[in-house]
Image (cartoon, rainbow, N blue to C red):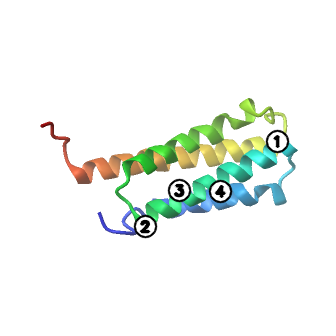
Amino acid sequence: MKRWTHPQDFIALLAGIYAFLSPIWTATTSKATTTMIVLGILTAGLAAVELVRADLLPAEGATALLGVLFFISPWVMSFSGTHPMAWTAWIVGAVVFLIGVADLQITRSHRGPATTS
């Protein structure tokens, strides 16, 4: 698959950057800030890799996993009471998860059915 063939990865890149920067303008706690920065950097970095290499199934699966991590992070890291940051995590998580799943489907459809030897 050619580079830049998954334009939705730009959305994942922007979501990662938004999550990374969100503690600047969102009411937060130290746990929430650390979580959003780390997950945001990982998401943006992975999205950049996917923009260059759109055929990496493990990276697309990891994107979906990061979406799940974003979504559960308010409960796991105990900042669900910090509503602005929790909502940021939930929305970014849902968007990143959907993009990861969509990328998996697109890549699988371009590769065709799996063959066994």
Task: Say left or right for 53 vs 49.
Answer: left
Return the residue found at the far front.
Answer: 117
**In-front residue for pair 65/81:** 65
For residue 93, what is the image quadrant? top right
Q: Looking at the image, can residue 36 be seen? A: yes
Instruction: Identify the residue at image location x=33%, y=52%.
Output: 106
Q: Name the residue under label 3.
A: 46
Whole-Å distance between the Cαs marked 3 and 4?
Answer: 8 Å
Q: Name the residue under label 1.
A: 31
Tell me the kind of residue under disc 4.
Ile
**In-front residue for pair 13/52:** 52
Whole-Å distance between the Cαs marked 1 and 2?
Answer: 32 Å
Q: What element carries label 1?
A: helix
Tell me the kind of residue under disc 3.
Leu
For residue 53, what is the image quadrant? bottom left
**Mark nearer the N terminus (1 vs 2):** 1
Number of other residues with Cα within 10 Å of mark 2, as a class: few under 14, some 14 to 19, many 20 or more: some
Q: Name the residue under label 4.
A: 41
Q: Name the residue under label 2.
A: 52
Q: Look at the numbered discs 3 and 4 and tell me whether their residues touch, using CB distance below 8 Å.
A: no
Number of other residues with Cα within 10 Å of mark 3, as a class: few under 14, some 14 to 19, many 20 or more: many
Q: Look at the numbered discs 4 and 1 and tell me whether their residues touch, using CB distance below 8 Å.
A: no
Residue 79 on image: x %, y %: 81, 36
